[in-house]
Image (cartoon, rainbow, N blue to C red):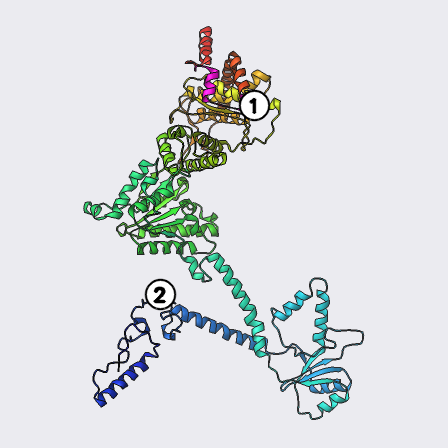
């Protein structure tokens, strides 16, 4: 007998029967003396899980057989056996409830003698005779016409309130005749009755004599009522429940899946992974993270010196500075898996879900170690806990439970396992102090706004895939974008490419970049907005006043562009000054120069038209704010020198204002008077300068009305060489000499 090949896949019966059959064949072969007869299925495993070529799945609930074969009951996982037991228990419960609550009839029961008397008196309309019951209906009054008149008498079974038949009648009667339908159904139910039958051979003859419609029926509605009362309504409820749970849990209707972590796992992919060369302007931050990369590559060098890997690093900085990209670059340089999750993903409406997701996240990370966990927007879950417990609400307490679990997990894992926790936030001042202590986040890495050199490098990175013209100078573009972060520069490069395509350029030119920068600052142009001739002239003089006062100020930033074309952000015109270098400090005279430039537009309106307009509202707001900060923040007051009246506990990266410390009312009035004095003095000095240079003001406004836009070269050609000394300083010296 030939042996079956190991690669063949016969349909195996039960393994015990195969072994018995194989033993019988061997015994028969030994009796007749046949040699070389081996087992029929030599490679048949003892269980279906040990078949060659099949990988066992030890997870509960998974099928361990081939496709199309039913697994034996003992091979099912505990979760599958629990599901079968659950549904069987539910079905048994429905049967018991059906027997206890809805196994009877909905009609009233009357004595048998009353039934015969009613038949004799002609009060019975029709009856249905079954083996156990007689169901009848009294004849209605002549003036009424109940719903069941002329219809076959139905056995009045007890129905649940959610029975589909009852619901269908209610829906069919909406909205006008619902009450009429309900009254008719109530009347029909009162006419029906039931009787326990007795041994009465003359009953049929009595019914025949009085013209009662009668019929017999052998029928059992028990199974149908079971389905209509329980299976169908609750089945629909379960379907709706499963649909909503699938939408809420994103993992199917299983409630237990809500505690699973929602972290996105980025595996090592040489084509899509980020590296340090994809970042610019954050050189110090990259240097701070190189130890993490080196430890994940080769931890033995650090262990030899007794050094430990920082458990966590907190990336802080303004929005758009590249915190998430830096975390991805660390994972890309380390070539390890990267778990990315937002702090808001831990917050759910169900109690305990956030803490469960924290535990699941760290468990999955330990299985894939070495790896990196990155939590973006940490402030969503790491906000400082309440000081007054009496005011803690339920939702707030749930967020605190999630934070407590995060603190426990950060203490629980060992840095030698190779799991590094990175987190990013732009609100470090509101984080819980326990989260920031050494041993949890050992290192705080600042990603600040890039310098001019950093912006130049960022422009090179984001423009490397663009088809650029030869005259594009990234250093000049970086000078035109002070304060912009990496996300802003990426948007500028993309807008420049779109504008070049819209204008029909074959390459992206410098003009496209400049227009994209202006769109990012003031919005797109609104050439469709019609401005009257007088308003247009007033706007031209207003912007010319800004430009001329700025041009007369020595050491000020050069005028890059003047425009009277309205923009979408409410600007009817604008003047852009390009800084020559990054400035971190300003002297008192430079602050006053900035106030004069801001007031130059209002001064020009006063000089030319003799009255002010509402166009200087934003300029006045900024000038007043600078003057107040000059006195209350920087301590440059004459009456209260070197006094700061603000409290800045932490750096605010979202533009929050500082809080003023308590001070006296007299000091506040003194500072207010000094602010008014500063603004009045700057206004008078700027007015004197524009009156002295009225010819240049008129010429600049005339050219602006004709061309609508003037660049740096046109402004320098009109105004001539820049003065070495401001005219208001000469007037101040003359005033001081006259007073002496």
| Residue 708 in the image, given as x and y percentages of width and height | 54, 24
Quadrant containing the C terminus in the rendered view: top left
| Residue 439 in the image, given as x and y percentages of width and height | 30, 46
| Secondary element type, mark 1 | helix
| Secondary element type, mark 2 | loop
User: Mark 2 = which residue?
Assistant: 59
Furthest residue toward left: 304
| Residue 32 in the image, given as x and y percentages of width and height | 23, 90
| Residue 407 in the image, given as x and y percentages of width and height | 35, 50
Q: In this view of the protein, which residue sits in the foreground, 718 or 361?
A: 718
Residue 705 quadrant = top right
Earlier in the chain: of badge 2 and badge 1, it is 2
User: Mark 1 = which residue?
Assistant: 539
Kindly report the secondary structure that dominates the magenta region of the rendered protein: helix
Q: In this view of the protein, which residue sits in the foreground, 33 or 54?
A: 33
- Tell me which segment is drawn in magenta: 704-721
Q: Closer to us: mark 2 or mark 1?
A: 1
Q: Report if residue 707 lies within the magenta region.
A: yes
Residue in the image at 72% along x and 62% along y: 176
Q: CA distance from mark 2 to mark 1?
A: 74 Å
Q: In this view of the protein, which residue sits in the foreground, 635 or 204?
A: 204
């Amino acid at each position: 007998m030939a042996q079956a090949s190991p690669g063949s896949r016969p349909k195996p019966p039960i393994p015990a029967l195969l072994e018995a059959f194989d033993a019988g064949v061997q015994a028969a072969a030994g009796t007749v003396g046949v040699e070389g007869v081996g087992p029929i299925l030599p490679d048949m495993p003892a269980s279906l899980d040990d078949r060659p070529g099949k990988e066992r799945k030890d997870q509960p609930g998974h099928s361990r057989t081939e496709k199309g074969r039913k697994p034996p009951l003992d091979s099912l996982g505990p979760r599958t056996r629990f599901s079968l037991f659950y549904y069987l228990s539910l079905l048994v419960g429905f049967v018991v409830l059906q027997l206890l609550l809805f196994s009877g009839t909905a009609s009233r029961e009357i004595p048998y003698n009353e039934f015969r008397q009613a038949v004799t008196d002609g009060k019975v309309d029709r009856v249905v005779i079954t083996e156990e019951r007689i169901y009848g209906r009294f004849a209605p009054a002549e003036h009424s016409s109940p719903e069941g008149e002329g219809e076959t008498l139905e056995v009045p079974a007890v129905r649940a309130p959610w029975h589909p038949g009852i619901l269908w009648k209610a829906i069919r009667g909406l909205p006008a005749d619902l009450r009429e339908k309900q009254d008719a159904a109530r009347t029909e139910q009162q006419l029906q009755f039931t009787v326990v039958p007795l041994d009465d051979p003359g009953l049929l003859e009595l019914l025949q004599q009085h013209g009662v419609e009668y019929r017999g029926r052998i029928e059992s509605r028990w199974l149908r009522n079971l389905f209509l009362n329980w299976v169908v309504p609750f089945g629909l409820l379960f379907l709706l429940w499963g649909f909503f749970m699938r939408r809420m849990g994103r993992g199917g209707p299983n409630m237990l899946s809500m505690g699973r972590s929602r972290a996105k796992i980025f595996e090592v992919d040489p084509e899509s992974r980020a590296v340090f060369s994809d970042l610019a302007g954050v050189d110090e931050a990259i240097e701070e993270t190189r130890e993490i990369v080196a430890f994940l590559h080769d931890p033995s060098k650090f262990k030899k010196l007794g050094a430990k890997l920082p458990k966590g690093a907190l990336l802080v900085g303004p929005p758009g500075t590249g915190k998430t990209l830096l975390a991805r670059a660390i994972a890309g340089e380390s070539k390890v898996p990267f778990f990315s999750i937002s702090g808001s993903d831990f917050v759910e409406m169900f109690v305990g879900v956030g803490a469960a997701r924290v535990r699941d996240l760290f468990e999955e990370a330990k299985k894939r170690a070495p790896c990196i966990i990155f939590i973006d927007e940490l402030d969503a879950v790491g906000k400082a806990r309440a000081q007054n417990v009496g005011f803690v609400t339920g939702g707030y307490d749930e967020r605190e439970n999630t934070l407590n679990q995060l603190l426990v997990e950060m203490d629980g894992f060992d840095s030698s396992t190779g799991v590094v926790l990175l987190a990013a936030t732009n609100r470090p001042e509101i984080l819980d102090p326990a989260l920031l202590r050494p041993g949890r986040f050992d290192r705080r890495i600042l990603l600040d706004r890039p310098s001019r050199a950093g912006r130049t490098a960022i422009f090179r990175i984001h423009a490397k895939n663009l088809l650029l013209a030869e005259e594009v100078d990234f250093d000049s573009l970086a000078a035109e974008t002070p304060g912009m972060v990496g996300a802003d520069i990426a948007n500028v490069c993309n807008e420049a490419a779109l504008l070049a395509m819209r204008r029909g350029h074959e390459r992206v030119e410098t003009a496209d970049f400049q227009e994209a920068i202006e769109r990012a600052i003031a919005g797109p142009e609104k050439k469709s907005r019609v401005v009257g001739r007088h308003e247009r002239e007033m706007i031209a003089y207003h912007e010319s006043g800004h430009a001329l006062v700025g041009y007369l100020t020595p050491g000020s930033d050069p005028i890059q562009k003047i425009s009277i074309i309205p923009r979408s952000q409410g600007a009817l015109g604008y003047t852009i000054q390009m800084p020559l270098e990054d400035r971190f400090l300003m002297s008192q005279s430079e602050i006053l120069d900035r106030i004069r430039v801001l007031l130059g537009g209002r001064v020009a309106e006063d000089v030319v038209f003799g009255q002010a307009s509402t166009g200087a509202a934003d300029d006045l707001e900024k000038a007043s704010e600078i003057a107040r900060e000059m006195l209350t923040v920087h301590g440059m007051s004459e009456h209260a020198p070197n006094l700061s009246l603000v409290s800045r506990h932490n750096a605010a990266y979202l533009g929050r204002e500082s809080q003023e410390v308590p001070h006296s009312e007299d000091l506040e009035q003194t500072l207010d008077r000094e602010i008014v004095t500063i603004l009045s003095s700057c206004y008078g000095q700027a007015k004197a300068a524009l009156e002295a240079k009225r010819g240049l003001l008129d010429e600049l406004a005339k050219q602006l009305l004709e061309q609508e836009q003037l660049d740096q070269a046109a402004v320098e050609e009109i105004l001539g060489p820049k003065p070495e000394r401001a005219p208001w300083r000469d007037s101040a010296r003359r005033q001081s000499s006259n007073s002496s």
